[in-house]
Image (tube, rainbow, N blue to C red):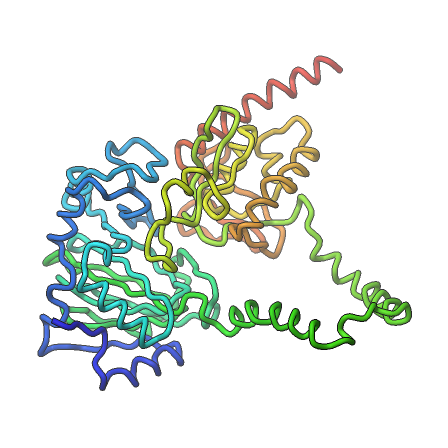
Amino acid sequence: MEYQVVEMQEAEATMASLRQGTPTLIRRTSHRDYYAGLYSIKEIEQYLKSGTCQYGYNVDVVSYSNGRRHTHNSNDGKAENCLGVVAQHAPVWQRFTKKRCSVRILHPQQQSEALWRVMARLEAELLCCVGCNAYLTPKGSQGFAPHYDDIDAFVLQIEGRKRWRAYSCPDAQHPITMRADYARHELPDPVLEAVLEPGDLLILPRGAVHEAESLPDAPSLHLTLSANQGSTWAALAQEALPAALIKAAAACRDLRLSVEPPQMDSLGRQAVLLDGKGAQYALTPSTRWALVQRNAARLVPGDDPSSVRVVFGTKNDRTTHARGEPAAEDAGVQGSCLEFAAVYEPALALILTGNDFSAQQLAEKLLAPDPTTFAAKLQRTVIGALRSQGLLRRVGAEGELRVEGADEPAQPRGAEVPPGAVASHRLPPQTLRLLRKAKKKNRKKNAALKRAV
């Protein structure tokens, strides 16, 4: 049987939806078996029993509660940093059936030739790479917080039913990066609310904020096909302009001439005029930063106790439809991990929680003996490396770094956050342990310094 994501008569509405950024629902009331045989819950169980399904690379187990997403990628429920560990069928299925956790399968087309063929046909039509994830949700559950993606999504309902809500937000108009979470109070009324049944198709253009919850009568399985990641005019210009300048310089003699002194002086004067504006953009230990995307990086031990690693960016590669070469990832090559001295582990743990921060605030939180020097090292070594890999973004106004559960009282849920402050997030137990250990160690150093003086 030859499957199609959309029929010929649906193609025009599909392209209009992608151009306008408007979610579109295509009902198939008379063809509930339209996607039958493409993928199934039974195939997911078989995959988990095969012994080849690895946490982070092939499967994620997640839940959504109290407005936040929680990841449960371990077999015993206790271990952390289980990236690459073989997922056992029994604990995964118990979390799915008993604890209402959702199961996300990455690259399911690797187990389904029919799905692979559908993706190949869609790639031929859209002239771009197409990726795929499968989402299995227990009845009456929601696995992910409201968010938008940096891709155009085609949602194919396979089994069960799921209620979808899509929102239009001013800060999500054709974005080039994704946003992990929205709180519901941040969102307007939905522009689309519908229950998807088997055979239905929902088109979510890039930037459409969305969330979904399975109905209470049965589990839900849907496929999300992703397209047009990085297929923007800005990305095209970024690739094309450097090459065009090289060709232009080779062909045009004037572009190869030296800049003459009067022209250089004029450029210098312009730089002086702009210097005042440039100062406000200078990077200092007080500059505030935030993760571009939460849960996009993990802190893992290094090869020896003197180092730690931040692993990122390889768990769902849409370009290759695969996790990449294991040997290359294990070696910590560019694009998969960064290695730091173990002294930075507490600071990295705080950074990866997702709170806004500055190097100076981290140094003060950790009670460093010389906060100014330590902050400068953090800015140069840690923040510089994370920025170079696109993991951090600069944020605007200065604000206080709040760490709930460390040494200060928790902020009440629903409390109003003052302008310029950063909302609290409860830290994982491992991060709290690292923070308290670092503080205790630095207190001893500070006391020793005072005695020496």
Q: Is residue 62 visible?
A: no
Residue depicted at x 69% and y 47%: 284
Is residue 380 rendered to the left or right of residue 172?
Answer: right
Q: Residue 336 appears in which quarter of the rendering?
A: top left
Residue depicted at x 28% and y 55%: 107
Relative height, residue 161 to residue 255 (above, below): above
Q: Residue 36 appears in which quarter of the rendering?
A: bottom left
Is residue 271 rendered to the left or right of residue 222?
Answer: right
Relative height, residue 20 to residue 55 (above, below): below
- Residue 48 screen position, x and y as percent: 18, 44
Kindly give the residue lying farthest to the top in the view shown: 451
- Residue 245 screen position, x and y as percent: 66, 71
Residue depicted at x 79% and y 61%: 276
Instruction: Give 400 or 160, whichever is nearer the viewer.
Output: 160
Relative height, residue 306 to residue 309 (above, below): above
Q: How many marks?
A: 0
Which quadrant, please, contains the C terminus? top right
Q: Is residue 293 visible?
A: yes
Residue depicted at x 40% and y 80%: 19
Which quadrant, please, contains the N terminus? bottom left
Instruction: Give 202 or 422, whichever is nearer the viewer.
Output: 202
- Residue 289 screen position, x and y as percent: 57, 50
Is residue 205 rendered to the left or right of residue 25?
Answer: right
Is residue 150 rendered to the left or right of residue 421?
Answer: left
- Residue 301 screen position, x and y as percent: 44, 31
